[in-house]
Image (tube, rainbow, N blue to C red):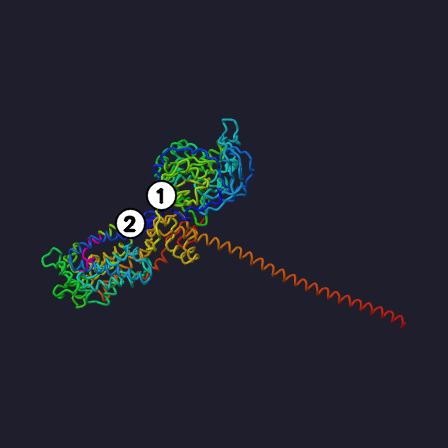
Amino acid sequence: MNTLATTSPPIASPHAHGGAGVSVVMLKVMAALAPATLYGFWLYGWPAIHLWFITVFAALLGEAFSLRLAGRRARPVLLDGSALLTGWLLALSLPPWAPWWLGAVGGLFATIVGKQVFGGIGQNLFNPAMVARVALLISFPVAMTAWVAPLPLTAAGAPGFLDGLMITLTGVPNLDAISSASLLGHAKAELSRGVDLLQSLSADHLGQYLSFTGARPGSMGETAGLLIAAGGIAMIAMGIISWHIPLAMLAGIAIPAAIGHAVDPARYLDATTHVLSGAALLGAFFIATDYVTSPNTRAGQLVFGLGCGFLTYVIRTWGGYPEGVAFAVLLMNTLTPAIDRLVKPRIYGRNRKGASLPL
Amino acid sequence: MGILDRIFGNHWGIHPDDRKRPAADLPLRRLPLPSHLYVPLQQHIGAPARPIVLVGQKVLKGELIAEAQGATSAAIHAPSSGTITAVGEITAPHASGLPVPGITIECDGEDRWIEAADIPDDPAFDPFSLEPAEISRRIGAAGVVGMGGATFPSALKLNIGKKTGITTLIINGGECEPYLSCDDRVMRDFAAEAVDGIRLMLHATGAKEALVGIEDNKPEAIATMQQAAAGFPEIRICPVPARYPMGSEKHLFSALTGKEVPADGRTTDLGVLVHNVGTAAAVHTAIRHGRPLVERIVTLNGGAWRAPGNVVAPIGMLVSDIIAATEFKEQPARLIMGGPMMGTLLPSEFVPVVKGSSGLLALTAEEAADGEAQPCIRCSSCVRACPVGLLPLEMSARIRNEDYAGAVDLGLKDCIACGCCAYVCPSRIPLVQYFGHAKGELAARDRAKLRNDATKRLVAARAERLEREAKEKAEAAARRKAERAKQKAAEAAAAAASADTSGAETTA
């Protein structure tokens, strides 16, 4: 009666699981990102599609290479979808007609230096896509700011598959002719020349830039604001992310922008422009909400989001670069461990300091 | 708290697929009596009971076979009539599969009850005329323990409640574990008995009112209990939202009272005693019919059972006998005693049903949802799911590095092992296993430290004793030496004196 062999090794409870999986989460994020991306493909045509594929492939390659070096099996890790998503987010933040090597270097940098050097998924301190973007921006400032006006896939004169491939591989033949500044870049350049915003940005100009259809120069993730926001709200509805980081980040941009604009409209852009320009929406919904590099608690996430937004505003307004989302997110990433240390949930039956509630 | 909760999220717990039906809706079945019953002596929190029968002795159903030993213990009775064939060891219904002391009974098949003790023939017997202490004593004598799984001796709990002057009795009909419906069946089939048990417990503790918390996924149980309690305004049936772990004592308490149990205290400190609804029914049987706790309702559920449902099983019936009586549809991937969230994996089929066995789950591989653990992606699902407000991901990271003190700082000792964190983890990290490991490791260290301290004390005492003895020896030697010297001096003096006197005499 008491000499029975165990039929299976002891396994701790629970003996049931909710069914969530890492790759499931990643797939849902990709689904939320797909509409904006497809719209971006249509808006910028074949060169953008080629660049996206190259960037994603490079990110996967970097991941596989690192795993091979570490002597781990690459296949299951690649299948979790995180490297693909990193490459995807990076591609959305690049100029759509950028040369192939920009995407390749960025993709490799993102997964090798941004992620695997730290130990792979879950270990990285910084958002890998933003690490790569900042590295590219500092190393190749010209290529990283060569924006083109949208030339939809169906429009006359849009490059076909092969022409698009040529543009991606050998560069835009006559870049200066078609390049144009993003709204934030334009405003910053004019301000630095002493032209105030009231003159440099006509109402007409603004209206064209700020249309939700996003038909304006910028990266793929910058232009389709409506679709990015819709994807973000879908993720909140699916329970993948909570509203805390996006809302706090957008508030962190909008509140100082509104104050600044009220004080001096000639010097400071208004809140709507700030929120709808650059990577603000992409950053708020898809970049800052990265699980690994954002705080654990709701309260911590609010602090983190506000910080991301506020730093973005500060960099855009007073920094050397017209856009600051990537820098802001990386700076707040450094604060995430500190936020997690300081902001903890209250334990049942204890006060915030951890002492038992009075009997 | 209200506004802060709304902003930062009041997200404790999870909403698992409860999978209680159709098993919960099927009528209760009685299993055929097995040939042997294996009754462990430790089916409760506290000291094991002391056997008072001999091998070969004939016992009747309900006869005391092991008496409570010490303050925290519970009596054990024969679950059926027959002959004692062994007072030895039985494999524990626990993942360890270790042997525990127990009594084996060969059933005679007659299932003959012993004559009920303490019940006068008078049909007008009114237990409410008994002293509260007498009610508690009889509940203790009937071997009633908490039927929700914690198996704390009920009489002891009632006495604590009486002593601390509780005002409210909370009856736990939450049954938040998925798959289980044994409490649901008690409330549906024995509502009047349960309500009577609640009234008896109110009498035993002196509490003014009883709140019966039932999760709203059991509308039939709520209806029958409301009907049964209709004539008793002191008993209120309170539907609570279905949310795991609502059946946790502290969480049900908070849901019903809006208050929180301090970490260093118990619900009794706030004037509330919590008892399971199955315990209430057992109290009724013990007091009204004088019959001890010798059987219980067990939920058979999970995809591998041919006929899921609730069965009445005698305590000590082997799981293998239950399987033989009801059969599997397929070989289960996991056989679990209790619920899927906190139940124990059974080491084999040859373990007995005990007083705390709420369910026997035979889960298919698909249900058991085995998966390889992946690295943590810090999604903080576990933080939101934790009903206690802990940081499971941070705690497990520290435990991985054997930084147990760090895990304790993060609140490891407040963990109730409910399993919410591991249930939601997309990386399928066995978080509860980490916490269980750390708690065991800490307990082992505490024991080692106690042993160490005791050894140190002994060594110090020995050193002190040796030193004292050496000193005493030296002192004694010195004393003897001094005495000898004194004696010598006295002798010398005496000799001198005698010489003097003789001298004087001679000179005189």
Give the residue at mark 1.
B364
Proximity of marks 1 and 2: CB atoms separated by less than 8 Å: no
Residue at coordinates 80% horizontally, 67% vertically from top-left?
B491
Quadrant location of residue B319? top left
* B448 left or right, relative to A237: right
Q: Secondary structure at mark 2?
A: loop
Identify the residue under disc 2. Answer: A239
Q: Position of residue A46 (x, y in %)?
A: 15, 58
> Is B249 inside the magenta-drawn segment?
no
Kindly indicate whether the residues beneath marks 1 and 2 are on one polypeptide chain. no
Along the line of sight, which residue is nearer the eye, A159 or A43?
A159
The amino acid marked with disc number 1 is Thr
The magenta region covers A218-229
- In what quadrant of the picture does the C terminus of chain B appear? bottom right
The residue lying toward the viewer, choosing from B210 and A283, is A283
Say which of marks 1 and 2 sits in front. 1
Viewer-proximal residue, A138 or B414? A138
Residue A204 in the image, given as x and y percentages of width and height: 12, 58
Q: Is residue A15 above or below residue A324?
A: above
